[in-house]
Image (cartoon, grey):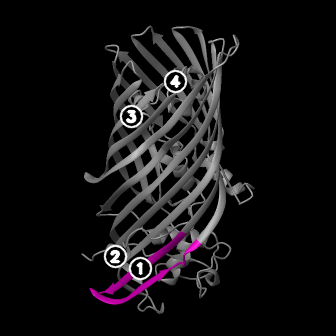
């Protein structure tokens, strides 16, 4: 069995693949359960309760609950594990999830007795995972995917054989690389053939490593009206960075290859090939949030909030490398290798709208309970040029592939003594991707230099915590968060270039089981 070219291509986090399409920007809109330990221990379900430096980032109306100043910081220790085909890949790291200050000004007014403000830093999302896998038998080849679409799209040979890697109309980067490195053969009359012919069999391997963050810096203003309506407005600046390395390799046996590197003749043989793709994306943007909490009676509160999109300006820097060894009768004939130059592209991106509704119950001084629903309107995402002019094809893809995500959160707190409280919570988030896409029943068009993509099927959080608050205003809260994420990775999309004979997708299920311990230290005064 020949070794696939993992050693040749897996050279670290190089810069790669343009990220201007649906599944790329879907990654950038992700948010996690992070913030103060009290907020985390209640699964982020505090939108109807307020009075917390992270809760006000979900419902700014919670700023109106404050009657004193509040300052806190929250470091955490995290253990991340990704599982593919029973194999585990782990990462451990220390982070700071939150730093914030809230102030309260008493006003001599019966209508609005307090005016409050807060400044805060919150880590909204952290990507740090690595996973890999292999399949001993694959149903098709990535070369067939590229060749079929090149034929259907009527890509010209001239577009694929230019001396420099300049993508012309109809040609994608991966098609150019495949053609110039003998992985996609030209037959006749504008038709192309991949290496997966009748009688070909093969195996594959893949590796993905991700690193990144989304940080938000917020200014929140608000107050209350006759201690019945608590309102708040927030303005947030968001900065993000994301880096990814993706490798995909195949070993194909009993195929048809060119007999030499110049592309002369066709002979029976074997091939070992690999695509190595890496990317660095940075962006910054602004968001507006508004919310309110209504208290008809002291024991019952209702919260509503909405978040506008974050209007991002983005930059991608990327390159892609392809390498292949060709064999006949177990003798290597030649090696081919090529890569794109390092390129950059600038564009704009709007994250989805968010709508949140909450109901909080206050049981005297004994406990709290909050139930919350959030709708993430993923189909409202938009991608455009540097001047925010939308790309119509990207809008169509977003609407075709995505649906709203629905998040249910429930969290509670029980005061054991005057100083000590126990907390617990649960959260569930549904998939942002339509069922037909999850089931590989439709075409998924992806970035030009890498066909791989991934999406979540569901995300769940199980949380617990304990808090200590003394009469002097000092508090220390401890939280434990377990995140279960069911994710699907597609190295090669399902191939519907010829609808009468579609080819199945090549992919694997990835399960993340992450654990986090957070400690918040704070003071109210």
Q: How many residues crowd around disc 3 within 10 Å: few (fewer than 14), some, or many (20 or more)?
A: many
- Which residue is disc 1 drawn over? 323
**Separation of residues labelled 2 and 1 (CA atoms):** 7 Å
- Which residue is disc 2 drawn over? 5
Tag 3–tag 1 contact (CB < 8 Å): no
Looking at the image, is mark 2 or mark 3 nearer the viewer? 3
**Separation of residues labelled 3 and 4 (CA atoms):** 15 Å
Image quarter where the N terminus lies is: bottom left
Tag 2–tag 1 contact (CB < 8 Å): yes
Work out whether residue 89 or residue 105 is closer to the camera in this orientation and state it.
Answer: 105
**Separation of residues labelled 3 and 1 (CA atoms):** 49 Å
- Which residue is disc 4 drawn over? 51
Q: The magenta stretch spans which residues? A: 318-343
Does the magenta portion include 109? no
Image coordinates of residue 352 in percent, x first then y, are: 62, 42
On screen, 476 above or below 26? above
Q: Which residue is depicted at the point 43% across and 38% down?
A: 73
Q: Which of the labelled discs sits on residue 520, or is there none?
A: 3
- Earlier in the chain: of badge 3 and badge 1, it is 1
Label 4 sits on a secondary structure element that is loop
- Earlier in the chain: of badge 2 and badge 3, it is 2
- Earlier in the chain: of badge 2 and badge 1, it is 2
Looking at the image, is mark 3 or mark 1 nearer the viewer? 3
Label 3 sits on a secondary structure element that is strand
**Separation of residues labelled 2 and 3 (CA atoms):** 47 Å
């Amino acid at each position: 069995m020949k070794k696939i070219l993992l050693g040749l291509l897996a050279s670290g986090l190089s810069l790669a693949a343009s990220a201007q399409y649906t599944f790329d920007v879907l990654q950038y809109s992700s948010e996690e359960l992070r913030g103060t330990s009290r907020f985390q221990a209640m699964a982020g379900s505090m939108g109807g309760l307020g009075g917390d430096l992270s809760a006000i980032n979900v419902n700014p109306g919670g700023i109106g609950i404050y009657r004193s100043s509040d300052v806190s910081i929250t470091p955490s220790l995290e253990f991340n594990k990704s599982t593919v085909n029973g194999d585990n890949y782990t990462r451990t790291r220390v982070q700071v999830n939150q730093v914030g200050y809230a102030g309260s000004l008493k006003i001599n007014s019966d209508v609005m007795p307090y005016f409050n403000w807060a400044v805060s830093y919150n880590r909204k999302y952290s990507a740090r995972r690595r996973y890999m896998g292999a399949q001993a038998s694959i149903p098709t080849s990535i070369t067939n995917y590229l060749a079929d679409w090149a034929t259907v799209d009527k890509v010209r040979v001239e577009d694929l054989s230019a001396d420099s890697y300049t993508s012309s109309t109809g040609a994608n980067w991966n098609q150019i690389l495949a053609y110039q490195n003998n992985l996609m053969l030209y037959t006749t009359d504008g038709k192309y053939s991949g290496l997966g012919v009748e009688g070909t069999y093969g195996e594959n391997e893949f590796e993905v490593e991700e690193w990144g963050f989304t940080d938000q810096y917020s200014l929140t203003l608000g107050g209350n009206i006759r201690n019945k309506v608590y309102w708040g407005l927030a303005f947030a600046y968001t900065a993000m960075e994301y880096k990814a390395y993706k490798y995909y390799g195949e070993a194909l046996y009993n195929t048809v290859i060119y007999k030499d590197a110049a592309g002369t003749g066709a002979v029976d043989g074997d091939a070992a090939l690999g695509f190595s793709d890496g990317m660095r994306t940075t962006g910054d943007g602004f968001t507006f949030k508004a919310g309110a909490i209504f208290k008809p009676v002291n024991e019952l509160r209702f919260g509503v909030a909405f978040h506008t999109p974050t209007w991002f300006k983005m930059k991608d820097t990327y390159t892609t490398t392809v390498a292949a060894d060709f064999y006949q009768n177990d003798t290597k004939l030649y090696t081919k290798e090529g890569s794109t130059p390092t390129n950059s592209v600038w564009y704009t991106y709007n994250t989805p709208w968010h709508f949140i509704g909450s109901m909080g119950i206050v049981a005297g001084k004994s406990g709290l309970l909050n139930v919350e629903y959030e709708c993430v309107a993923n189909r409202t995402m938009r991608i455009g040029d540097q001047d925010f002019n939308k790309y119509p094809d990207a809008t169509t893809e977003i609407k075709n592939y995505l649906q709203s995500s629905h998040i249910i959160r429930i969290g509670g707190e029980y005061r054991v003594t005057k100083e000590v409280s126990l907390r617990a919570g649960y959260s569930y988030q549904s998939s942002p991707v339509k069922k037909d896409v999850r089931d590989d029943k439709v075409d998924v068009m992806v970035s030009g230099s890498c066909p791989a993509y991934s999406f979540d099927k569901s995300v769940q959080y199980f949380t617990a915590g304990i808090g200590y608050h003394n009469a002097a205003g000092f508090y220390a809260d401890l939280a434990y968060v377990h995140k279960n994420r069911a994710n699907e990775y597609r190295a090669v999309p399902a191939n519907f270039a010829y609808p009468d004979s579609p080819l199945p997708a090549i992919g694997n299920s990835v399960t993340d089981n992450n654990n986090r311990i957070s400690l918040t230290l704070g003071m109210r005064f």
